[in-house]
Amino acid sequence: MSTSRRSFLGRFGTGLTAPLVLGATNKSGTRKPVVGEGAHTYEVTHDWGALPAGIRYGNTHGVCEDSHGHIYIHHTVYETSEKSDTMVVFDHKGKFVKSWGAQFKGGAHGLHIRKEGSQEFLYLCDTKRAIVVKTTLSGEEVFTINYPKEAAPYATPIKYSPTNVAIAPNGDIYVADGYGSSYINQYDSAGKYIRTFGGPGNQPGQLSCPHGLIVDTRGKDPILMVADRSNKRLQRFSLDGHHIDFIEDVPAPCHFNIYKNGDVVMPDLFARVTLFDRDNKVIVQLGDDSHSEYMKTRKMTRDHFQPGKFVCPHGACFDHSGNIYIVEWVEVGRVTQLRRVA
């Protein structure tokens, strides 16, 4: 079953009221842009977080918050950066806390955080080394998931480049081979292989660049929701890998994060961020600049980025207060805080 185009356009397309962008041209230069509408209105702070001397962002790919309110940024490292630390951690005010992760330079991508018992762990995707690594919050390695040689589709070596991770309530780990061969590989909580599903194509159950994924626990039964990016859709699966349905005509979905009230933030690589509710109906589009030449802008210096507009959103997360952090696939890196003001 799939969501019809007419139904989708009512959610994601021309039926939406254009969101507000205020303050971007204030003469004093001090007023920050404001985006959104109604109860989902946000003050925009671009280039949030004070980087220490010696670290320069490369492409900023992943973001998450821990239980202490610390924000973790996973980036590839800019070529002229003195230090190669790919993980940068800030407190909730944007003050630098620590950095680590030089081994992920050039491959830092997906980032997931999960509390297990009394401790929190990070799951990091490295597209360059083609691995998923579970670490402590300080970067100590717990285990690594390598090339899925146990999986039948991978018995003969094929391209494998994991982009993001999702974790089920029982601890099962779902790894999206988004930049490789478009399969999803499932493991238990210890990293032991369980099954593979998906695979390249555009039919139900098939995928094309499953770039991001999340286990959606808002309904009666948990569901795996996948950002089927090159197919321009979201696709939902049961936790044992059976296709359920589509939400179609999503331009370039990258990943997801769910807030405690059931709202979902979805970064769209084509210059906008979408918020939708627990029924997967669009609430608002934020920072939409999808009619610009964003693919050219993403390679430029940050003075070419428009206030209140996004270039290529790649990762996003809510914090405990409902503020949103957006990281973008731009060569000089960019972290934006959307502070909820309504």
Image: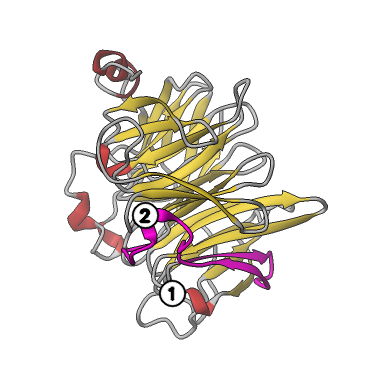
Tell which of 60 and 186 is nearer to you: 186
Is the C terminus in the top left, top right, bottom left or bottom right quadrant?
A: top right
Secondary structure beneath disc 1?
A: loop
133 magenta-colored: yes
* The label number, if any, that marks residue 82 in the structure image: none
Q: Is residue 25 visible?
A: no
Q: CA distance from mark 1 to mark 2?
A: 39 Å
Q: What residue would you read off at disc 1?
A: 56
Q: Which residues are magenta?
A: 131-160
Q: Residue at x 68, y 64 (%)?
A: 137
Taking 88 as reference, is 107 left or right?
Answer: left
Q: Is residue 66 magenta?
A: no
Which residue occupies 65% across, 66% down?
Answer: 135
Mark 1, residues whose alpha carbon is within 10 Å: few (<14), some, or many (≥20)? Answer: many
Q: Amino acid at mark 2?
A: Pro
Q: Considering depth in this image, is 58 or 133 the residue closer to the camera?
A: 133
Q: Secondary structure at mark 2?
A: helix
Residue 43 placed where, x, y %?
49, 40
Residue displayed at 68% across by 53% down = 66
Residue 141 horizontal/vertical position (percent)? 65, 72
Residue 300 left/right relative to 154: left
Label 2 sits on residue: 153
- The residue at the point 44 percent across, 76 percent down is 105
Q: Quadrant of the N terminus?
A: top left
Q: Where is residue 224 drawn, in percent x and y?
A: 51, 35
Q: Position of residue 124 (x, y in %)?
A: 54, 62
